[in-house]
Image (tube, rainbow, N blue to C red):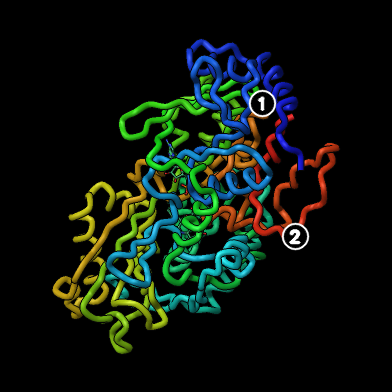
Amino acid sequence: MKRVTRRSFLKAASFGSAGVAFGAAAPTRAAAGARAGVDARSGAAEPSGAGPVRDVVVLGAGMSGLAAARDLARAGLDVVLLEARDRVGGRIHTLHEQAPHGLEIGAQMIHGSRAYTWALVKEFGVETRPLPEWERWRFSPAAGFWKPDGARERALAARLDQAYHAYRGDDISYQKFLDTLKLGEREIDSVTENALSWSAEPDEVSLRAAIEDSAAWDTYIDQNFQVVGGYDQIPRKMAETLGDRVRLSTVVRAVEWGRGEVAVTCEREGATDTVRARRAVVTLPIGILQTGKPAFSPDLPGWKRRAIDSLHMGRVVVVHMLFDDWFWRDPKTGRKGWRAHEGRVSFWDPHPLGHGMPALQGWITGRAAQELSDLGEKAGIARTLDWVEEALPKAGARKRLQWSYLRDWVRDPYALGCYSYTRPGGWPQRAVLATPVQNTLYFAGEATEPPPHYQTPPAARAPSRSRPPAPDASGRRPPPDPASGPRFFLPGGLPDLN
Ligand SMILES: Cc1cc2nc3c(=O)[nH]c(=O)nc-3n(C[C@H](O)[C@H](O)[C@H](O)COP(=O)(O)OP(=O)(O)OC[C@H]3O[C@@H](n4cnc5c(N)ncnc54)[C@H](O)[C@@H]3O)c2cc1C
């Protein structure tokens, strides 16, 4: 493994100094620090008093940032990870206070026995359990409960596949494509689900991305699994291995960069700090990057901005309700799970195997999630209870409610949505998003992942997609060591520090 020697560092630094001329004081100091040959490994401050120049600064401590930082640290690099929240895990978040088995308010489950997450499950000895196939009940006030007919569903899926196969046109919206199929009411209900799996509406989603995703899921998913005791165990254990490289409650405000140098301005408990490094790995959700905050200076190149704008964040609101009894499990009147409003409103039992507490989870997506988000927490919970009572009017849900919690991902300040989807015309910009800028700004995270989408990176990563190991002293890359545990694939490859 190639260590970052003082010599190689100086080489990179002199290369960096030929890059962008900074106007602001902080990066000028970073550049000066680099030129003065600060030893990143020793962490020694440069003569002017500025902080050490790290090898890599990672923005965001969700699964992607943690995985990137772990991999880079393992490769012997000096890494620091900046996270705005007071916890790691980002969009993985488990509530433990009310239910000892844990209530997931972010990522719910491991999708499939081939998910990359299994390597982490094994490494940390985390317990999992398979989830039974969902009972696919539908509900509408007019028709009551019904179960989709399996044979008709399969026939519809085959028809859809054929139409995908035949499609040669532009990247239009999924809705425009559906319009050409002349579907019946219940068929529309079924296919709307495809768009809603991104938690977006059919007219918001790219057809080509939908086709690509459908093909990927076909080969990928078999069964879903829950992490017993909470999904958040995994990011927390990952963070433990990183020790004080992780800085929580640290909000990144600005990123000034030139080739081979980065100065990240961040705020922690009211105090401003600048972290300098030779490379940055940006794992911030696409919703955050679209706000222009943190500001990049100079701005990101047009091709990168275009890629960022070609995606959008889906909308999900999660509502957890604890009742005095499992009234929805009543075999005569109840349903263990059901979907209503064309799949925009779903309820399921998060402890379906009889474990845990009488908890019912509401999963509200697309425009229904926007509606709930606009209502706010109190009225949103009331509306969710209306939907439960609409389906089970005699159960007395309101009177039985012991506790409730609404998690609005649409307005979450550090995500601004649940996961990304591609806008019509935006395919295939994810790969562009994953491309590094001037071997200095690296982009990773959920939005940069190849299909299948809407899941936890690097959960989607088979070990064979691992990034290559660091070059050895002679510059050769040794073959990947399959026994070396989970590795993070940094789109665009390992930052080249030579
Ligand atoms: C409701 C919901 C359900 C889901 N269900 C599943 C599921 O069942 N299975 C599955 O595999 N996946 C699921 N996902 C998707 C999965 O959670 C995400 O894809 C994954 O967690 C994203 O990881 P990430 O590291 O790319 O991004 P994030 O987890 O979002 O990490 C980015 C980090 O950047 C931080 N950040 C943002 N702005 C700043 C700033 N200015 N300064 C510093 N830090 C900042 C954030 O706080 C965050 O910690 C779900 C997601 C949601 C929201």
- The Cα–Cα distance between marks 1 and 2, rounded to whole angstroms, is 30 Å
Question: Alpha-carbon neighbours of circle 2 within 10 Å: few (<14), some, or many (≥20)?
Answer: few
Q: Is residue 92 visible?
A: yes
Foreground mark, 1 or 2, reads: 2
Q: Position of residue 497 (x, y in %)?
A: 70, 31
Question: Alpha-carbon neighbours of circle 1 within 10 Å: few (<14), some, or many (≥20)?
Answer: few
Going by the image, does 315 lie left or right of 59? left
Q: Can residue 292 be seen in this view?
A: no
Residue at 66% x, 42% y is 491
Residue at 48% x, 13% y is 24
Q: Is ligand 1 less than 8 Å from the beta carbon at label 1?
A: no
Q: 90 and 473: which one is in front?
A: 473
Going by the image, does 404 lie left or right of 339? left
- Residue 48: numbered disc: none
Residue 164 falls in image quadrant = bottom right
Q: Position of residue 482 (x, y in %)?
A: 75, 60
Please determine whether, in this image, residue 67 is positioned above or below residue 387. Answer: above
Where's the N terminus, which quadrant? top right
* Residue at the disc numbered 2: 482
Please determine whether, in this image, residue 53 is positioned above or below residue 101. Answer: above
Q: Where is residue 103 in the image (x, y as percent from the top left)?
A: 36, 66
